[in-house]
Amino acid sequence: MLDVLLDGLLDSLKLIPFLFITYVVMGIIEAASSAKMRDKILNVGKTGPLWGALIGVIPQCGFSAMGANFYAFRLITLGTLISIFFSTSDEMLPILISEAVNPLLIIKILAIKVVIAVITGFTIDIVLRLFAKAKAQDEEDEEFEFELSAGCNCGGGLWINALAKTIRVLFYIFIFTEALGIAVYLIGPDNFEAVMNAVPVLGPVVAAFIGLIPNCAASVAITQFYLEGAISAGSMISGLLVSAGVGILVLLRENKSKRENLYIIVLMLVLASLAGIGIDAFGIL
């Protein structure tokens, strides 16, 4: 047990320089792209789900919050909102990079999420238009200002912000790595994966509920579990599809209809679970 705990600590500490450098680069990308992406998503029209998916996949902490704010003011469609949420992966990308995962695998994971986000977003918008269930857009001009990074603590300067994120994510990585190591130790390496995948359909569903937690800990846990072989590729995708960071919190806070918020969350859980089940069934990843 002591060896398990020590290994988890050492494995976590090794990631510090890689995580820090990754967050510095992501901070530079964020500073350069924020204003342009915000303006773009406000003028996408019926192609919203496509742009929402492409913008959401950019490693930036505020796009899911931005999308939730825009939807609350009916500046974008529900399909565009879902495409942003599904494309966003919170802390998945920096973890995969810091763990030196094959770049082709990273690109494949991101591509799968984008494709699912685009298809889902367009389908939702088409269905809503066909059945006339979409709410009328408010034509009146309103003064609408908010911080792009609302709720994600992105302020404080590039280096300080990168260091803060590194420490926070490293903490979660350490916790989940240790938890996984202890579980494997107690259950036995040969039995652990069998227990996690005893009911194939259940894995993606459980992962989707975990991913819904509005905190970076969710995406950290799901990514780490996948890298350790504890969950399937479908379960990982299912959890990461709904892992939109603070986007869900902003939606709950800004969108006045509680019933609609519940519908959106349930819809995300169902679609993400089906996507994960399909990926495992067809061996896509």
Image (tube, grey):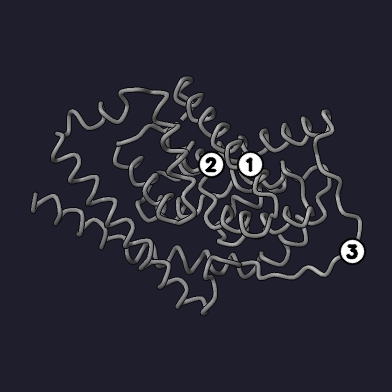
Question: Which of the two residues, 220 or 68, is positioned nearer the viewer here?
Answer: 68
| Residue 117 x/y as whole percent | 63, 39
Pointer 2: what residue?
A: 241
Q: What amino acid does circle 2 point to?
A: Leu
2 or 3: mark nearer the eye: 3
- Residue 50, image quadrant: top right
The residue drawn where x is 50% and y is 66% is 25
Q: Which residue is mark 1?
A: 264
Specify few, some or many for label 2: CA neighbours under 10 Å numbering under 14, 14-19, or 20 or more.
many
Compared with 260, 21 (above or below) is below
- How many residues crowd mark 3 within 10 Å: few (<14), some (14–19), many (20+)? few
At 42% from the left and 67% from the top, the residue drawn is: 165
Mark carried by residue 141 = 3
Image: 225 above or below 205: below
Q: Residue at x 33, y 62 (%)?
A: 170
Q: Nearer the viewer, mark 1 or mark 2?
A: 1
- Image quadrant in which you'd find residue 229: top left
Q: Is residue 131 left or right of 61 when viewed as pictured?
A: right
